[in-house]
Amino acid sequence: MDIPIGELARRTGVKVPTIRYYEQIGLLPATPRTEGRQRRYGRDAEKRLAFIRHARDLSFDIEDIRQLLALSETPQRSCHEADSIAIRHLAWTEERIRQLESLRDELRRMVDECGHGRICECRIVEVIGDHDLCAHEGH
Amino acid sequence: MDIPIGELARRTGVKVPTIRYYEQIGLLPATPRTEGRQRRYGRDAEKRLAFIRHARDLSFDIEDIRQLLALSETPQRSCHEADSIAIRHLAWTEERIRQLESLRDELRRMVDECGHGRICECRIVEVIGDHDLCAHEGH
DNA sequence: TGTAGGACCTCTAGTCACTAGAGGTTCAAG
DNA sequence: CTTGAACCTCTAGTGACTAGAGGTCCTACA
């Protein structure tokens, strides 16, 4: 091991500036440096970063990840907290899907109704401007 | 008409600072002022802001809205451009939904597998840390 | 051993679409 | 004429990075 930041980036799929950013906000601990002050990483850092990467892919936000990492370091405690973070996140995701589906339906209706002629016959601009035609309610 | 900004905000559901922000970035034109330099709005501004509001609800970004507004002011031109903005946006929305659905499935699996016991038996932290269990690919 | 050049470093500022706050002014009702 | 809610401008902060400037280090090859 003992790899430089670029190699860590290649292995985890996290960009180099992002890794430095994670260190800066304390999501990754400071790592040993060479004499010339370049970062060198070990196996633990790679695991931790892979965890972060995957959690971000799952759209967990940084604060949730911080908590999940803390929980993973205290195996004695109940998993109730990790559980509730995941459940909350699941509920958020389901809500987002519902919103996007109604958005998609409305966009489809708009595009279907567009006569592909001049703008005065095109429903798209008109529909967006007209609240009443629209079942979707704002965020 | 000739209403103050707070009334416009109430009518359109757009917050006061957001209206000022839209003016600042040129999405709304500068409006007449009272002698004391307070903004007063007419029917046109209300329509334009309602359009913006609804387009934002539909998750169009500001640049798209700027274009749609410009198109709506040139009714002679083909609606092809409005059409293609909407179609592009529809495709983006459908892609987002697909991503969120696979995310939701993975979260559901995680939550279901969680034994609700101690963290060493809880799959949530473990699953997030393990790339291979996961079909979902990053953004 | 010298050197080329790619990888690394820090620091600042920018992204998007707002939101929050400080500190001051104007408007309209009573 | 007074009160206080609504208005004003300006700056800075949000989240999670991303881009760029300007400089240093490491390593492979001649």
Image (spheres, coloured by chain):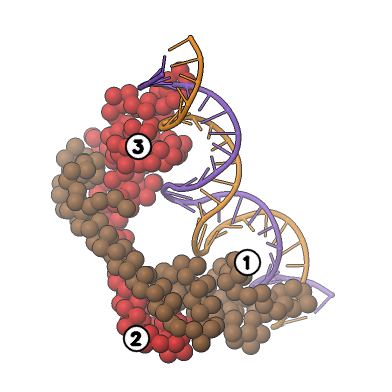
Chain colours: A red, B brown, C orange, D purple
User: Along the line of sight, which residue is nearer the eye, A44 or A87?
Assistant: A44
- Does any portion of residue B29 appear in the rendered image? yes
**Which quadrant: the N terminus of chain B?**
bottom right
Asked if badges 3 and 1 are on one and the same chain, I answer: no
Q: Which residue is mark 2?
A: A113
Q: Of tags 3 and 1, which is closer to the observer?
A: 3
Tell me: residue B63, above or below residue C4: below
Q: Residue at x 59, y 74 (%)?
A: B28
Q: Residue at x 44, y 36 (%)?
A: A20
Q: How far apart are the two marked residues, 1 and 2, measured between alpha carbons?
A: 34 Å
User: Along the line of sight, which residue is nearer the eye, A97 or C9?
Assistant: C9
- Horizontal side of D25 relative to B22 (left or right) equals left
Q: Residues within 10 Å of mark 3 (few under 14, many from 20)?
A: some
Q: How far apart are the two marked residues, 3 and 2, measured between alpha carbons?
A: 47 Å
Tell me: residue B125, above or below residue B46: above
Please, what secondary structure does the residue beneath circle 2 have?
Answer: helix
Percent coordinates x, y for residue B124 in the rendering: 22, 46
Residue type at mark 3: give it: Ala
Q: Of tags 1 and 2, which is closer to the observer?
A: 2
Please, what secondary structure does the residue beneath circle 3 have?
Answer: helix
Tell me: residue A72, above or below residue A123: above
Which of the labelled discs sits on residue B24, or is there none?
1
Mark 3 and mark 2 lie on one chain; the one further toward the N terminus is 3
Asked if badges 1 and 2 are on one and the same chain, I answer: no
Q: Residue at x 46, y 86 (%)?
A: A119
- Chain letter for mark 2: A
Residue type at mark 1: give it: Gln
Q: Which residue is mark 3?
A: A9
Please, what secondary structure does the residue beneath circle 1 have?
Answer: helix
Instruction: Tell me the quarter of the picture where residue A101 sits.
Output: bottom left
Q: Residue furthest bottom?
A: A121
Percent coordinates x, y for residue B60 in the rendering: 43, 70
